[in-house]
């Protein structure tokens, strides 16, 4: 029986794919647990509409991500950390702090896991930090770290 998977099923296929499975497996497990629907003409038509809608949503999200990337280019975040003589730094600036500061000061919500430069900033001066906003859309923000004694 041909079925359209509604969610990922291990050893069968990914969500949205059309697969051929045994009749009993389809009726007794996949369809009963709402993991799949039978592939009829109407269900295939609905699947095509969903794929078109998903592509439109992805294009819209990518456009928003590009707009956010252009906003990030203009932003410089400033942090101050304790430092000793000769510019030695005690402490660092983490990705969590960068994400919180962006949210608080500029209203841009970024998940800290999307920041590509994951090592904490442990040096004084200006550092460029890359942020993945969407597939193949990477924004760069400048972070200035100053010392205080």
Image (spheres, grey):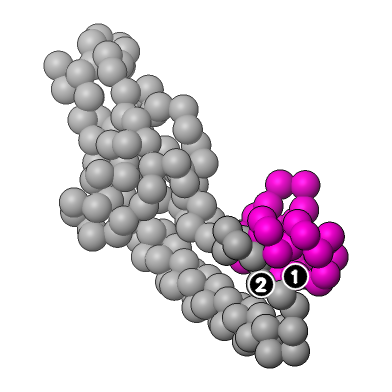
Q: What residue sits 44% from the left and 72% below the top?
A: 64
Residue under numbered circle 2: 37
The quarter of the image holding the N terminus is bottom right
Secondary structure, mark 2, is strand
Could you say which quadrant of the image residue 5 lies in? Answer: bottom right
- Magenta residues span 1-30
Q: Residues within 10 Å of mark 1 (few under 14, many from 20)?
A: many
Nearest to the observer: residue 22 or residue 14: 22
Q: What residue sits 71% from the left and 75% below the top?
A: 38
**Is the C-beta separation of discs 2 and 1 under 8 Å?**
yes
Name the spot of residue 73 as percent of width and height, x first.
41, 59
Residue under numbered circle 1: 3
Q: Earlier in the sequence, mark 2 or mark 1?
A: 1
Q: Is residue 2 magenta?
A: yes
Alpha carbon distance from label 2 to label 1:
5 Å
Name the spot of residue 115 as percent of width and height, x first.
46, 43
Q: What residue sits 66% from the left and 72% below the top?
A: 37
Q: What residue sits 38% from the left and 24% below the top?
A: 123
Could you say which quadrant of the image residue 48 lies in? Answer: bottom right
């Amino acid at each position: 029986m041909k079925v359209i998977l509604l969610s990922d099923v291990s050893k069968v296929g990914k969500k949205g794919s059309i697969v051929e499975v045994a009749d009993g497996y389809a009726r007794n497990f996949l369809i009963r647990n709402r993991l799949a629907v039978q592939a009829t003409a109407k269900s295939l038509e609905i699947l095509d509409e969903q794929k078109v809608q998903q592509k439109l949503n992805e294009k819209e999200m990518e456009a928003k991500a590009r707009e956010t990337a252009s906003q990030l280019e203009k932003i410089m975040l400033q942090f101050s950390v304790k430092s000793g003589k000769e510019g030695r730094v005690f402490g660092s600036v983490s990705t969590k702090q960068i994400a919180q500061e962006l949210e608080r000061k500029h209203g841009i919500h970024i998940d800290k896991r999307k920041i590509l430069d994951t090592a904490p900033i442990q040096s004084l001066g200006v550092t460029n930090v890359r942020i993945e906003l969407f597939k193949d859309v990477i924004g760069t923000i400048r972070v200035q770290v100053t010392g205080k004694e």
